[in-house]
């Protein structure tokens, strides 16, 4: 599946952004859709995921309570609402699709389709 991420930008500390990730060819199958991020000089890290059928959500501790992952009913788009942004949230954000099981869905190597990444910069 081909994924297109959008919605990044420059925002001040405490601000909000909403990222979107859409499949170019319409509804697709997945077990989980997730957002990862990668800051300069750091490894790619798990941010949030959503069970594509059941809708249950999972978050990294660093974003819990500030970020919300969601999907549309048509199963074509996944969103990441980011509130109370901090400078530490600055990174390139990627959406991704996996068919893996719950116990492995925080591991980036288990994802087989990735969006191109969208830059989020939070100024202090």
Image: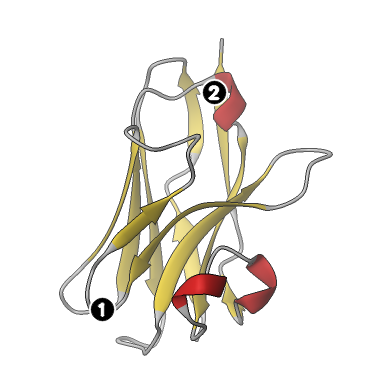
Residue 8 position, x and y percent, is 48, 42
Q: Residues within 10 Å of mark 1 (few under 14, many from 20)?
A: some
Q: Name which of mark 1 and mark 2 comes first in the sequence.
A: 1
Instruction: Out of 95 and 45, give the one closest to the viewer.
Output: 45
The answer to whether residue 97 is left or right of residue 107 is left
The circle on residue 122 is 2
Residue 90 position, x and y percent, is 60, 31
Identify the element where label 1 is drawn: loop
Image quarter hosting the C terminus: top right
Say whether marks 1 and 2 touch (CB < 8 Å).
no
The answer to whether residue 63 is left or right of residue 91 is left
Location of residue 89 by image quarter: top right
Location of residue 71 by image quarter: bottom left
Residue bearing mark 1? 75
Residue 120 position, x and y percent, is 55, 37
Q: Residue at x 56, y 16 (%)?
A: 123
Instruction: Out of 101 and 120, give the one closest to the viewer.
Output: 101
The circle on residue 52 is none
In the picture as drawn, the residue positioned furthest to the right comes out as 41
């Amino acid at each position: 599946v081909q994924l297109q991420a959008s919605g990044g930008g420059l925002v001040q500390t405490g601000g909000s952004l909403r990222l979107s990730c859409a499949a170019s060819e319409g509804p697709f199958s997945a077990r989980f859709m997730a957002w990862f991020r990668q800051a300069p000089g750091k490894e790619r890290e798990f941010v949030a995921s959503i069970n594509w059928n059941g809708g249950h959500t999972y978050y990294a501790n660093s974003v819990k309570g500030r970020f919300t992952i969601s999907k549309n009913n048509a199963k074509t788009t996944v969103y990441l609402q980011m509130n109370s942004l901090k400078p530490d949230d600055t990174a390139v954000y990627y959406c991704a699709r996996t068919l893996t099981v719950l116990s492995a869905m925080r591991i980036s190597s288990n994802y087989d389709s990735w969006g191109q990444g969208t830059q989020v910069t939070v100024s202090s």
